[in-house]
Image: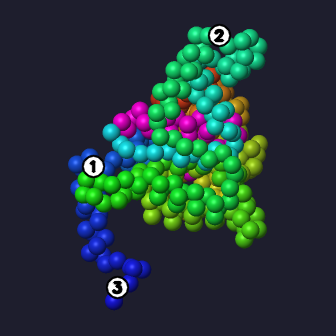
Amino acid sequence: MTNPKWKTQREAFIESLSYLDDRRKGKITSLKTPWQAFNNATTNGIEWHSTTVIGARPATGKTAVKNLLVNGAFKHNPTTDFRVLEFQFEMVGKVSAIREYVTHTELSYKALCSAENPLDDDNFEKCRVYAKEKIKFPIDIIEEPCNILEFQQIIHDYMAMHMYTDSNGDKKYRNTVITLDHSILLKRAPFERDVYETLYSLGEAVTFLKRKYPIAFIILSQLNRNIDAPERNEDGKYGNYILESDIFGSDALLQHADTVIGLNRPGKQKINYYGVDRYIINKDPFILVMHFLKSRNGETGLGFFRTEFHKMNIVEIDAPPTQERRLKI
């Protein structure tokens, strides 16, 4: 009589050695990101069967980070076969596509939409050529909000639809990046009393799904209101930093996450010297800090970036210098 509810330690070690062998031979690789700081904080990128949670204030750049992760995935992983399924509840696919044209043409969203002057033929042609190339990538979009039960069923159906047959004739699930923008925009299921129960359900669902399928989840979240308390925006305080507890519904979701990232633009809060290390920000609103708060198989720490929102781009930079402290005599 066999019991599927457990496996022997021997099986676990055999699986681990097979995984390590496939990684050293390049048969299994992480999904590299556009930023070395991100790759360094993780296992040289985002692993399959994992969940990444990214939290930030509104208008900080988390959707831009997600878009660059997705778009960069195809550029930086040309030999990896994978698909992308995006749950885009905050903006429709059309708007997201126009934001990509901003990056490509370096024109503003308003200019592309002919808000002041009609878009000229040359730039419209640039958009058309970009779209022609971009639609070659296997990316699918869910725009209509759904509850957790519908969310799970869509993913089950999607994974089954895109199975393939390997060289041995075995049916396999295809590697898939699944994004959710934002976690709080999931509809409440009939058995959930509030948004916190929805987040608990989401955490349990993504853990089940990432164990069953080769999925890399990227989930965007808001921060709690406490992050805007005046004392947290005073120069050189530990409270300047984003903490795990600042992620909205952190108790519900973060225990299921493999990587947790908090984004901050301290210059927007008029901070000159950021955190206890007193990084010299000089109220620069374009400096973005990635706080790697949890990395199950990597290292925590900080990464610094410069936002180029007019291009819908984010560029990695060196850590700013820190303010010299004078000793009190």
Tell me whether circle 3 and circle 2 mark residues in contact (CB < 8 Å): no
Above or below 305: residue 177:
below
Q: Callout 2: 10 Å neighbours few (<14), some, many (20+)?
A: few
Nearest the viewer among 111 and 153 is 153
Going from N to C along the chain, the mark reached first, 3 or 2, is 3
Residue 120: numbered disc: 2
Quadrant where the N terminus is found in the figure: bottom left
- List the residue tagged with mark 3: 2
Spot occupied by residue 122 in the image (x, y as percentages of width and height): 58, 10
Nearest the viewer among 202 and 294 is 202
Please, what secondary structure does the residue beneath circle 1 have? loop
- Count of marks overlaid on the render: 3
Above or below 302: residue 151:
below
Q: Is residue 323 visible?
A: no
- Residue drawn where x is 27% and y is 69% of the image: 13
- Residue drawn where x is 68% and y is 62% of the image: 198
Spot occupied by residue 168 in the image (x, y as percentages of width and height): 24, 57
Direction from residue 228 to residue 322 in the image, left or right: left
Q: CA distance from mark 1 to mark 3?
A: 31 Å
Direction from residue 307 to residue 23 in the image, left or right: left
Q: Callout 3: 10 Å neighbours few (<14), some, many (20+)?
A: few
What's the colour scheme? rainbow
Tell us which disc is closer to us: 1 or 3. Answer: 3
Quadrant where the C terminus is found in the figure: top right
- Specify the quadrant of the image occupied by residue 8: bottom left
Tell us which disc is closer to us: 1 or 2. Answer: 2
- List the residue tagged with mark 1: 27
Going from N to C along the chain, the mark reached first, 1 or 3, is 3
Spot occupied by residue 303 in the image (x, y as percentages of width and height): 50, 38
Q: CA distance from mark 3 to mark 2?
A: 69 Å
Direction from residue 15 to residue 86 in the image, left or right: right
